[in-house]
Structure formats: structure tokens, C-alpha cells
Image (spheres, rainbow, N blue to C red):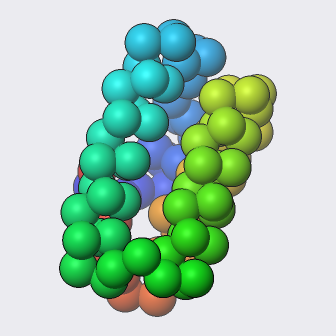
Amino acid sequence: MFTASRIYLDPPQMPKPSKEAISAMTSTVMSDLAAVKVVVGDTEEMAGLETFVSISLRLIAATNPSKLRDIMRVVEIQARMDGKHVYE
């Protein structure tokens, strides 16, 4: 559940993800992307999406955990303000 105290007063401590965790996340995301590619096909747009996701995963692996937490918080707040589903 989204609460102000969860975000502002008591932020969770996020350790740097292990190589195994990053590998598992990358594998899951790339598997999901492959499922999308089956539906969309091998298009220029799909190639752009694959490139974007690959860059994003490398940035996540290289970024300071506190910066990741801040960005995740902003994205969650914006999604909730827009009425989008937020995965918990």
C-alpha cells in the first residue's frame, strides 16, 4: 500500500544488487521482451525497444542504489497520479 510514511519518512534501504540478482532480472526482462517480439514481429520499433531495455538494464546495474531508489520513488508517484497500475 502506498503511504507517505513509506516513501518520505521511512525509506527502505536498498543494497547494491548482487550479480546474480542483476542476471536474474535481466533474464526475466529479456524473456518478457522476447514474448512481445513474437507478437509485434521483427520491426524497427522492436529493435529500438530492445536497445532501450538493454541500455536501461546496464544503467541499473551500474547506478548507485540511493539514486535508483529516488528514481523508483518518482516513477511510482507519477504512475499513481496517472492512475496506472503499480507493481508491488
Q: Position of residue 43 (x, y in %)?
A: 48, 82
The extreme bottom residue here reads 82
Q: Is residue 79 left or right of residue 65?
A: left
Q: Is residue 37 left or right of residue 22?
A: left
**On the image, which quarter does residue 1 sit in?**
bottom left
Q: Is residue 18 left or right of residue 65?
A: left
Front residue (pair 86, 61): 61
Residue 68: quarter of image: top right
Residue at the spot 55% in from the left edge and 83% down from the top edge: 45
In the rendered image, residue 5, in percent from the top left (x then y), is placed at 48, 47
**Residue drawn at the location 74% of the way across and 28% of the way down:** 62
Q: Residue at x 31, y 58 (%)?
A: 34
Residue drawn at point x = 34 percent, y = 80 percent: 41
Q: Where 72 falls versus 20 (above or below)?
A: below
Residue 66 can be seen in this image: no
The answer to whether residue 30 is visible is yes
- Where residue 56 sits: x, y (%)? 64, 50
The residue closer to the viewer here, 56 or 12, is: 56
Q: How many marks?
A: 0
Q: x%, y% of residue 18? A: 51, 11
- Vertical placement of 13 versus 63: above or below? above
Toward the viewer: 85 or 26? 26
Q: Is residue 7 above or below residue 25?
A: below
